[in-house]
Amino acid sequence: MRLTVNGQSQTQDFEILKDPRLNTSPEDFQAQFDFLMKVRNKVTEANEGIINLRKIKEDLGYLKNKLGSDEKNKDMMDAIKQFEEELNTIENNIHQTKNQSVQDPLNYGIKLNNRLAHLMVEQAQGDFRPTQQGEEVRAKLSKMVDEELGKLKNTIDGNLYKINQMAKEKGVMFVN
C-alpha cells in the first residue's frame, strides 16, 4: 500500500487476515464476494435502464413542447403518449416512483432494484457463503430485472424509430 501526504510517500506491504474466530474458508469468502458482485452488477443494470428510460422521457417531453397543440400533430402526440405510458409501466416495475416521504416505502412497497439492493445488504452482513435462499432470490429477481429490461428494449425499438420518422416527416428538428 502507498500513502501520500503533502508530497511525501510511504509504502508498506501488509496482509489482510481473517478473524481467527471464524470458520469461514477462502472459498466461502470468494463465494460471498462473487454473489455480492453479481447482485451489484444487476442493480447497476436496473438503475442504468431507469436512467436511459428517463432520458427518453425527457426527450419526449421536449418533442411534445416543440409540437404544441396543433391538431395536425395529433397522430404524433398520440404515439408519444402511448410510448410514455409503456415507459412508465416498465419504470414502475423496476423502481418505486411514488416515494416522496420516509413512510412511502411502507405505503407502496419496494420494486426490483431496491429488493436486489436489500438482498445485497442482507447477504453482506456477515462473513459467510451466500445462503441457498439468498441465491434463489438473487436468481429470481435477476430474471425479473432481465425481463423488464427486455421489455424496455422492445418498447424503445418499437416506438423510437416510428416517432423519429414521424418527426422527420413533419420537419420537427431536435435542436435544443
Image (cartoon, rainbow, N blue to C red):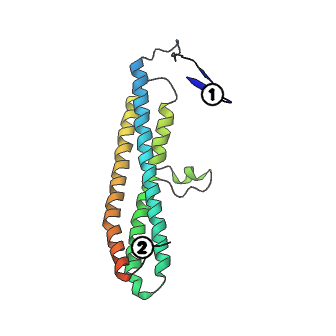
Name the residue tied to disc 2.
81
Name the mark on residue 4. Answer: 1
Q: Nearer the viewer, residue 94 or 175?
A: 175
Residue 158 on image: x %, y % = 31, 66
Three-letter code, disc 1: Thr
- Compared with 44, 86 (above or below) is below
- Count residues near mark 2 (Cα–Cα under 10 Å), then give few for <14, some for 14-19, many for 20+: some
- Compared with 55, 174 (above or below) is below
SS under mark 1: strand
Q: Quadrant of residue 157?
A: bottom left
Residue 139 on image: x %, y % = 35, 39
Query: Which of label 1 and label 2 is nearer to you?
Result: 1
Q: Quadrant of residue 7?
A: top right
Residue sitting at x 40%, y 83%? 74
Residue 48 on image: x %, y % = 44, 51
Q: Which residue extends farthest front?
A: 7
Q: Quadrant of residue 77?
A: bottom left
